[in-house]
């Protein structure tokens, strides 16, 4: 990419998209274009076609998606498969129609089977049954990978798919109904700390910034306590007995998860766009006896750290970082999801990239960002 290349970042306000914009600007790219969802509905095929026709971008980062945690994925199943398929179909197809030089499609490691061998290699895609709670989202992302592969093979495009592990960072989603585990833990323990300290100024300021089911900081103390309790932020003993806080966490705490700082993810995306092509992740036809029957599969790239942590240990790391003194309650009656999801990042390392921010450092950084 040249510094004046026209680069479209779809989803520029999101967790990854905003980090990609920041990375590109820091590297001197000056011709960035974006649209908010109110300005351009990526589910609208005609609107996307008109946008590409008028803007003619040279490069596209497809970071726009409908995303959420285990509750949202399982509750809004139709929304997750429909909206993600529509966004991908429209952007990828118009990138082909309008001759985009290179497109980077962002997926998720939930594409791998529920009982996938660990660590998860790219070759394990479509080898077994998916985790039920996020199956619609995973199928949409798998379709995106196959769409990129298929357009490359039929039309000679240069579309690359990357599958990030669990991401966190600035502009994350802290909505307790729809957030992923790490931002949910950050916010729950931030609220729990304020609750046990009887710090209603902090509680009301937090709810004014991001109401929970319509309950903001102007509500009565009783209403606020009720909504916090619904989402697992309460007391483990009566208020008059020392105000010991308690935070409920879904599941047993045993599942293992891998986490990557969003700005590291952005750096990996920009690195791949600048330095790698579809040909770099495609099997060589020279090695095949019959090139006409060569199967090109699993050309996507895992993006992660190759290191994981239990939800139990993650929760205690967040607790220490936030300064929450109360108790953690792991509700084993709630679903755990997949027990282990660790990426094999051998391909990524071979392509020349490795992560920088450790989880301990990252949790400190995201809590500082959240408070600010």
Image: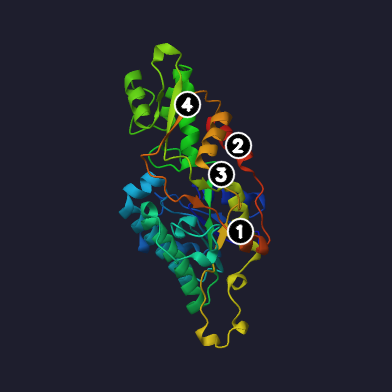
Q: CA distance from mark 3 to mark 2?
A: 18 Å
Circle 4 residue: 327
Give residue 72's mark. none
Q: Earlier in the sequence, mark 2 or mark 1?
A: 1
Q: CA distance from mark 4 to mark 1?
A: 36 Å
Circle 2 residue: 365
Circle 1 residue: 345
Residue shown at 52% from the left, 76% from the top: 296
Tell me if residue 149 comes above or below residue 173 in the rendering: below
Mark 1 packing: few (<14 Cα in 10 Å), some, or many (20+)?
Answer: many
Q: CA distance from mark 2 to mark 1?
A: 24 Å
Mark 3 packing: few (<14 Cα in 10 Å), some, or many (20+)?
Answer: some
Q: Which picture quadrant has residue 316?
A: top right
Mark 4 packing: few (<14 Cα in 10 Å), some, or many (20+)?
Answer: some
**Judging from the image, what secondary structure is the residue with disc 4 in?**
strand
Q: Earlier in the sequence, mark 4 or mark 3?
A: 3
Q: Choose between 189 and 328: the one closer to the eye.
A: 328
Q: Earlier in the sequence, mark 1 or mark 3?
A: 3
Q: Quadrant location of the N terminus?
A: bottom right
Residue shown at 37% from the left, 49% from the top: 73
Residue shown at 45% from the left, 43% from the top: 180
Residue 273: where, in percent of width, then height?
61, 62
Q: Is residue 45 visible in this depiction of the protein?
A: yes
Q: CA distance from mark 1 to mark 3?
A: 16 Å
Give residue 309's mark. 3
């Amino acid at each position: 990419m040249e510094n004046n290349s026209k680069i479209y970042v779809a989803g520029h306000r999101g967790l990854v998209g905003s980090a990609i914009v920041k990375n590109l600007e820091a590297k001197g790219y000056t011709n960035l274009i974006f649209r908010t969802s109110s300005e351009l509905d990526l589910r609208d095929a005609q609107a996307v076609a008109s946008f590409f026709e008028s803007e003619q971008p040279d490069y596209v980062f497809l970071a726009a998606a409908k995303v959420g945690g285990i509750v949202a994925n399982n509750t809004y199943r139709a929304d997750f498969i429909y909206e993600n398929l529509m966004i991908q179909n429209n952007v990828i197809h118009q990138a082909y129609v309008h001759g985009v030089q290179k497109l980077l499609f962002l997926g998720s490691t939930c594409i791998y089977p529920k009982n996938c061998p660990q660590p998860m290699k790219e070759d394990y895609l479509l080898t077994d049954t998916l985790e039920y709670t996020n199956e619609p989202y995973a199928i949409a992302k798998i379709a995106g990978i196959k769409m990129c592969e298929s357009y490359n093979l039929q039309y000679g495009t240069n579309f690359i798919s990357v599958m990030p592990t669990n991401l966190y960072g600035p502009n994350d989603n802290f909505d307790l109904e729809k957030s992923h585990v790490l931002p949910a833990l950050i916010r729950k323990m931030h609220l729990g700390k304020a609750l046990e300290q009887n710090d209603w100024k902090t509680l009301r300021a937090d709810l004014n910034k991001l109401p929970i089911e319509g309950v903001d900081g102007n509500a009565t103390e009783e209403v606020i306590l009720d909504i916090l309790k619904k989402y697992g932020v309460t007391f483990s003993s009566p208020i008059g007995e020392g105000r010991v806080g308690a935070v409920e966490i879904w599941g047993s705490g045993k599942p293992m998860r891998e986490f990557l700082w969003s700005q590291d993810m952005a750096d990996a995306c920009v690195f791949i766009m600048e330095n790698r092509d579809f040909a770099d992740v495609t099997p060589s036809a020279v090695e095949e006896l019959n090139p006409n029957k060569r199967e090109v599969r699993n050309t996507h790239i895992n993006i992660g750290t190759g290191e994981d942590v239990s939800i139990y240990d993650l929760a205690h790391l967040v607790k220490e970082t936030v300064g929450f003194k109360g108790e953690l309650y792991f509700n084993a009656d709630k679903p755990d999801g997949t027990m282990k999801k660790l990426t094999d990042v051998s391909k990524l390392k071979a392509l020349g990239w490795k992560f920088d921010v450790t989880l301990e450092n990252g949790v400190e950084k995201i809590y500082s960002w959240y408070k600010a």
